[in-house]
Amino acid sequence: MTPPKSTRPIRRNGAAALKASDLERIAERVLRLSEADETEVEISAITDALTRFANNTIHQNVAEQTLSISVRAVADGRTARATTNKTDDDSLRRAADTALKLARNEPKYPGLLPMLGRQKYQKVARFFGATAAATPQDRAKAVSRVCRVAESRRQTAAGIFSSGSSQFLMANSKGLSARYEQTRAEFSITILEEHSSGWAKSNSPDIRRIEPDALAESASRKAADSRQPRESAPGRYTAILSPSAVLDLVGFLFYDFAGTAILDKRSCLSGRIGKKIFGENITIWDDAYHPLQTGAPYDGEGVPRQKILLVDRGVPKNLVYSRATAKKMKAKPTGHGFSLPNEYGEAPMNLVFAGGEATTDDMIRSTERGILVTRIWYIREVDPYEKVLTGMTRDGTFLIENGRVTGGIRNFRFNQSIIEMLANVETLGPAVRAAGEESFEMVVPAMKVHNFHFSEVTKF
Amino acid sequence: MMDDCAAWAIETAKRRGASYADARVMDIRQREIAVKNGEVAALGESETLGIGIRVIASGSWGFASTDRLTREGVQACAAEAVAIAKASALAKRGDVVLAPETAHVDTWQNPFLKDPFRIPVDRQIELLLAADREMRRIKGITLAEGSMTFRRIEQLFASSAGASIHQVKMQSGAGIVATSFAGAEIQKRSYPNSFGGQHMLSGYELVESLDLVGHAPRIAEECVALHSAAQCPEGSRTIILGSSQLGLQIHESIGHPIELDRVLGMEANFAGMSFLTLDKLRKLKYGSEHVSVVADARLDHGPGLGTFGYDDEGVLAQCTPIITKGLFTGYLSNRETASAIGENRSNGTMRTESWNRLPIIRMTNISILPGSWKYDDLIADTDDAILMETNRSWSIDDRRYHFQFSTEIGWEIKGGKRCRIIKNPSYSGITTEFWNSCDAVCSREDWTLWGTPNCGKGQPMQTMGTGHGAAPARFRNIKVGVAFAK
């Protein structure tokens, strides 16, 4: 089934709006102008606005609108891409000709498959009028409110409040036509005191689900509770990780679930598929249709996304495949391919963890000595096969002693294998839609993990 | 066309009540090529043209951007920028004040010999495939990769104060990577650097000068040899950093903390703040007497990714002493933050990724000045150390104090000679302690202006290229091996 045509316009600076039908007409023109054996066109029309505050005042306030028309040409078993943001006939023809010319000047792609024909897509509803209609005044009022609260507590607020909408269209000369639209809203806040800070962040396609005041309250409390942080000795601790911290860590693992990563021998799952490497309590799906997920129901080639069980009770079970990778590995495409041509093949982007029932307070109460982590930062891979990551804690790190939080501590550096971490999970919270900084959003629980390796401590 | 768009923007902003307005019209063209294990993995070109309009109205900032470059589209965008500025004023504490700057009228272009977009793409692909073949000739290489990136940026900056600056920048970059998976270990070697190799404000002559094919067998052999090499020890050691690794060390532990927007709290929510509070200027002993660092955007410094004629708010490129024989002497500023700390002029570091992003304070070329040591003499002078080359991982806290780096390869230095290979080398420390432990920097002969193409900052995120001139340097009593400690 083809999704119903949208008639919603993308707001473009209050001037004439681009409608979905405009994108269709651009696609038709590109397909008509192209002289390639096969042609694919991907169009995105994006409107975004972001209000940024620091020192209890708005210091940056921006809006953008961008249009991208990306043309992939196939000529005699070769393929290349050219992209423009200009819609006149000359520019569209030049993009189509450039893609074709590039393709004609490269060697053949041995694994290149014919483009897909018409597909059926499951419907998802991720466009919210309230988000698309948000104004700079709406965002400024919320920001003004949280800044006043911070000021009244002798604290300093910094953060962002953003909103926007996107329309995407993919079409090709074999008759494929796919459309997707979504809105997004995000609020992130850091509250600072002289020697401490707290942080909270949330995002959703529906701006009505964003609660700036509650997020500010949470960040404010963390800043207050971590005043005068003490220095704790580095070492292995029980760590209680917020959903955001879990997200930022495990996000590094999931590119390893790509079939291409296995073929390239750069996946930490090489030799580990089917083996129990995580705890019994770790089950993970990729599910683009989960109610807390966002994103299109099709991949970069227009293949419908499938729900895939990646990890079943501690055992990595399945990989994800683009069409070409699936053929090489004698598997079926799963709808996770990136736009062609690309080096990486595919990856799961809609992760959903099975959660538990423990609250963070439950986890704290059951911990004799441990570290409560709000946010982690600047995470990088140290060892790609053992999947050791390094990074820092930030904006609210607390010591737990005898079942209670006894105060803030200076931030730790960690060097921790994520494989080991997911084998050491004692307790899970409910899976929620979390937002971090280093990975895409996912549905993930808070975790209590034993033997987490905090290797060094910093000065604040 | 660029002039018309800028004029429409500024005229509309002023008419709508802006006390100041500037406009950047940017036309960016890019080519990207990647090969992998003997095949072309990615091949594409892109172009993007649009305008970003920045205004002050009611004493506050507003910014809007559009790719609709009709008179109607630009005027609507300028009106939106003014409306946004007026909304910003709902939460303002004071009016924006800008340090003065002459309204320059000028044109500028970086010199280059060969336009990379005029080099046939099949020739570029064949060069990468030839290097790829050479890497895969070495038994044990499981993944060979190569890439080239070219970017041409044409831009016009105009302001309500009368500035009109036309600039064209041509960037080129290329590199190769060999990876080997064996046992339970993945090892990697890159040439001439990680992060896609070397990147400069240059034409295709940069790619030709790198000799990717000639270096391919060496890095592939080193990559395979890492599997049987000794593990980097844990403890306190003397280390010598190769110039590209020192470039990244400068980027993370000097370049970011000197950004005045971080210091003043403007980046607190995402990129973070800085340990370099204002009281430390001209007082803090940042490093040893061997450490002198400049922020230099002028062409005289070299064709780095941080080289330009004027920054993205129309301030002339400058050279600012950042560390002078160990003493902390300067921040990176813009017109707003220079004014906020009582300086009478911005030192010209406002840069934007593209027309749809607000310019923010970014590194230009942040470089350590060459010392006096010849590389061979430095090795000969070192009894017991680890030489570390080519970055593999990098991480630093949000105030830029505590860092940890690992490199792709290391060598043991014993009795003044480079000996066996060390695998998984890593080191960590506190920024000021580290720079104060420097006791030798190599001379101009071994100094390279490296390009870091992937520096992320800002909300919405912007990726920027920065330059870092560096030569091999020696540091005493550095903690090594923590990253791989069990």
Image: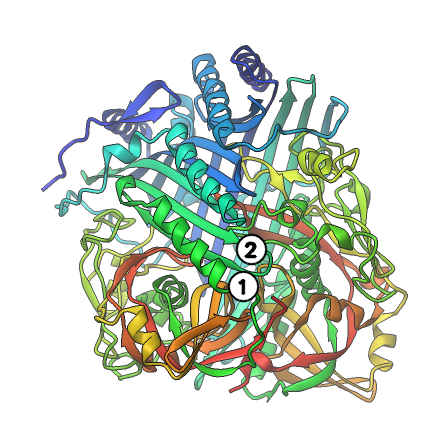
CA distance separating discs 1 and 2: 8 Å
Q: Residue at x 80, y 46 (%)?
A: B301
Dot 2 alpha-carbon crowd within 10 angstroms: few under 14, some 14 to 19, many 20 or more: some
Element class at badge 1: loop
Residue labelled with disc 1: A227
Return the x and y of residue A114 as percentages of the image width and height: 24, 49
| Three-letter code, disc 2 | Glu
Return the x and y of residue A460 as percentages of the image width and height: 60, 66
Residue labelled with disc 2: A193
Residue B177 falls in image quadrant: bottom right
Which is more toward the observer, A105 or B329? B329
Q: Residue at x 48, y 68 (%)?
A: A397
Question: In the rendered view of the protein, which quadrant contains the N terminus of chain A?
Answer: top left
Q: Horizontal placement of B347 versus A360: left or right?
A: right
Element class at badge 2: loop
Residue A343 falls in image quadrant: bottom left
Q: Horizontal placement of B206 versus A261: left or right?
A: right
Q: Chain of mark 1?
A: A
Which is more toward the observer, B51 or B341? B341
Q: Is residue B396 visible?
A: yes
Residue A242 falls in image quadrant: bottom left
| Three-letter code, disc 1 | Arg
Which numbered disc, 1 or 2, marks the residue that appears first in the sequence? 2
Q: Chain of mark 2?
A: A
